C-alpha cells in the first residue's frame, strides 16, 4: 500500500518534470545537462582527459575569451593548471541562447570557489555577432590573441591589455 503510494507520487513528480533539469532555467541546471558529463559535477574534470573548471584562468579570466570558447568550442593542446590536455571541447552556439550562455558562465565563474564577475546576455550577444562566421573550434593559441578576447565595441576592451596571464 505504502509502496504504491510512493510509486504514485514518484510517477506524478516525474510527469511534472520535477526531476528534469529544465533547460534554460538557471546556470546550474544548464551546467548539469550540458557540461557535467565531461567536467564533472564538482568542476574538477578527469585528470589528463577533461580539464577542471575550478580555479582556471580560462574560466576566471577574460569574459570575451570564455564566451568565444563556449560558443565555438576548443581543440588542440592546452595546458590547464599544469596539465596538458589535447582533446575536443564541443561548440555550443547552436544549442544555447544568449541568456543561457550568460547564466551558465555566471554560474561557473562563481561556483566551486571561483570568484569572478558575472556575464550578461548582452555581452554574449555581442561576441556571438562578431564571431558569427567562425565555423571551427578555437585553439588555445588563438584565444591568447587580443583580437579574440574582450567584448566587441566595449571601451574596457579598447584600453585593456590582452589577458595572457594564464597559469601554465
Ligand atoms: C565532450 C566533453 C566536453 C563537454 C560536454 C564540455 N567540455 Fe569543456 N572541454 C572539454 C575538453 C576536452 C577541453 C580541452 C580542449 C582541448 O584540449 O583543446 C575543454 C575545455 C574547456 C574550457 C577551457 C579549459 C579549462 O578547463 O578551463 C572551458 C572553460 C570549458 N571547457 C567549459 C565547458 C562548458 C561551460 C561546457 C558546457 C557548456 C563544456 N565545457 C562542455 C570537454 C568538454
Image (cartoon, rainbow, N blue to C red):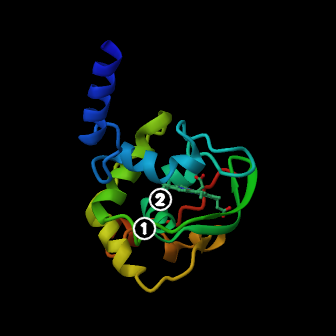
* Depth check, front residue: 4 or 162: 4
- Return the mark for residue 45: none
- Quarter of the picture containing the N terminus is top left
Residue lying at the far bottom of the rendered structure: 133
Left/right of residue 13 with respect to residue 86 in the rendered view: left
Q: Residue 82: image x %, image y %? A: 74, 48
Tell me where residue 141 sits by quadrant. bottom right
Tell me the residue at 61%/74% (across/down): 142
Left/right of residue 48 with respect to residue 70 in the rendered view: right
- Asked whether the residues under the numbered discs 1 and 2 touch, taking CB atoms below 8 Å apart as contact, a structural biologist would say yes
Query: Looking at the image, in which quadrant does ligand 1 appear?
Result: bottom right
Badge 1: residue crowd in 10 Å (few <14, some 14–19, many ≥20): many
Residue lying at the far top of the rendered structure: 2
Q: Residue 37: image x %, image y %? A: 56, 48
| Alpha-carbon span between mark 1 and mark 2 | 6 Å
Q: Is residue 42 above or below residue 136?
A: above
- Of the numbered discs 1 and 2, the one sitting upstream in the chain is 2
Whether residue 154 is visible here, answered yes or no, is no
Tell me where residue 9 sits by quadrant. top left
Tell me the residue at 76%/55% (across/down): 84
Whether residue 151 is visible here, answered yes or no, is yes
Tell me the residue at 31%/38% (across/down): 14
What element does badge 2 sit on? loop
What element does badge 1 sit on? loop
Q: Residue 7: image x %, image y %? A: 33, 25
Question: Which residue position holds label 1?
Answer: 150
Q: Is residue 134 above or below residue 68?
A: below
Q: Is residue 28 above or below residue 79?
A: above
Disc 2 beta carbon < 8 A from ligand 1? no
Question: Which residue position holds label 2?
Answer: 62
* Depth check, front residue: 120 or 1: 1
Tell me the residue at 35%/43% (across/down): 20
Amino acid at each position: 500500500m505504502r509502496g504504491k503510494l510512493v510509486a504514485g507520487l514518484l510517477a506524478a513528480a516525474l510527469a511534472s518534470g520535477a526531476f528534469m533539469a529544465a533547460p534554460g532555467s538557471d546556470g546550474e541546471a544548464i551546467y548539469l545537462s550540458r557540461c557535467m558529463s565531461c567536467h564533472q559535477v564538482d568542476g574538477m574534470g578527469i585528470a589528463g582527459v577533461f580539464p577542471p573548471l575550478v580555479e582556471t584562468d580560462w574560466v576566471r579570466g577574460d569574459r570575451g575569451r570564455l564566451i568565444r570558447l563556449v560558443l565555438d568550442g576548443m581543440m588542440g593542446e592546452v595546458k590547464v593548471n599544469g596539465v596538458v590536455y589535447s582533446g575536443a571541447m564541443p561548440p555550443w552556439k547552436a544549442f544555447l541562447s544568449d541568456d543561457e550562455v550568460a547564466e551558465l558562465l555566471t554560474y561557473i565563474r562563481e561556483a566551486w570557489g571561483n570568484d569572478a564577475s558575472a556575464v550578461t546576455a548582452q555581452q554574449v550577444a555581442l561576441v556571438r555577432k562578431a564571431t558569427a562566421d567562425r565555423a571551427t573550434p578555437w585553439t588555445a593559441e588563438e584565444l591568447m590573441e587580443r583580437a579574440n578576447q574582450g567584448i566587441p565595441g566595449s571601451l574596457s576592451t579598447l584600453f585593456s591589455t590582452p589577458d595572457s596571464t594564464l597559469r601554465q
